[in-house]
Image (cartoon, rainbow, N blue to C red):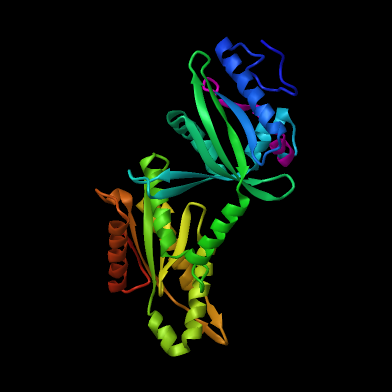
Amino acid sequence: MTELPDNYSGRILTGAFTPTLKKRTHSVIQDSNTFDKYNFPIMPYITAWNQEDNSIWFEFVGQQLIDLLDTNMAEVSQAFRDSIQNQRIFHYTDLSQSKVEEEIITQQQISRKRQGLRENVLRNKQVEAVYHMLLPSGKTIWLKDRGCVEHYPQDNITLTYGSLTDVSKEMEQKALLEQIGYFDDLTGLPKRIIMKKLFEVRIGERQRGYIDDFSVLMIDIDYFKSVNDTYGHQMGDFVLKELASQMLSLKRVEEDIGRYGGEEFYGISRGNIQSGVKFAERIRQSIKKHCFSCRGNDLYITISIGVASTNEMDEVSMDKLLALADKRLYQAKREGRDNVRGGLS
């Protein structure tokens, strides 16, 4: 084997691996190192994944990434993992590849899904993702990852070589556009269009086996027209805003809340129908006790909620799930309001 690269702290070149893998690794390191010296605005890297012990490490990292993470070559792998806040993966959702779905994987989910993510990378023979990173300096950046994947069965090693590019400006612009177009001006809650995106993400998680079921909640304020008629639209707007704030404070990490339109809101809850009903009851009972105080007026309201889950349906679609939840919402209304109806409840 030729001379080791400067500051090498990988495992392949000094380990008990085949000459084929060592030669390939050494060659790619040399090419990456040469490229890195030109200081282009991309950060080359080489990682290796040992399938026997499920470990992954860097064989080479560009100096720009080491500087960003304020670390050294030996510790860059751990520093990189610790800095990831979430990971974005983009999937084509139809055969014509005209529609792209964005999957957001949080830091907590990454460890649980790591095996599945690596298997997907190996199957596709490429890496394509965006990482939201929190640097040691406290600055947040977005890094786009694109790489090629090679598998060496004799060594049971998967080699990935590629580059990371800072796309912070592009992702921040995307987030701004989404915030402008997707969030309700009055309540600050996600609009119905976000519900559709969340539904697509949950369906994807269900199809890939990450979750078994999820529920949709349709939430409506009882007798809201009388609030506007009695107290005026200013009070009505206050109730909508305060209700949104209360529901946000009640939701858990596996739950989402948004505004459907008018005095109707929606919720999405990972888990079975019982989990969805518990989420709905938590909201209903809390709102019933809450005093809505505005301009000297103290008002108490109630809400009615319909809940439906995917496992109740032979064929899952957003329209059918919403229709079932809506049907149960109106059942709750007919049965006296201040009710939750879901499944056999």
Q: Is residue 62 magenta?
A: yes
Q: Inspect this view and state whether residue 97 appears.
A: yes
Horizontal and vertical percent position of residue 140: 66, 50
- Above or below, 313 against 22 in this view is below
Horizontal and vertical percent position of residue 70: 75, 39
Residue at point 53%, 62% (across, down): 177
Taking 42 as reference, is 228 left or right?
left
Closer to the camera in the image, 328 or 57: 57
Q: Is residue 340 magenta?
A: no
Q: Quadrant of residue 12?
A: top right
Closer to the camera in the image, 1 or 200: 1
Residue at point 47%, 81% (across, down): 236
Horizontal and vertical percent position of residue 287: 47, 70
Residue at point 28%, 73% (across, down): 334
- Above or below, 81 against 175 in this view is above
Taking 59 as reference, is 124 left or right?
left
Closer to the camera in the image, 215 or 141: 141
- Above or below, 52 against 211 in this view is above
Taking 174 as reference, is 141 left or right?
right
Taking 251 as reference, is 331 left or right?
left
Q: Inspect this view and state whether residue 278 appears.
A: no
> Which quarter shows the N terminus?
top right
Residue at point 36%, 42% (across, down): 207
What is the magenta range?
50-68
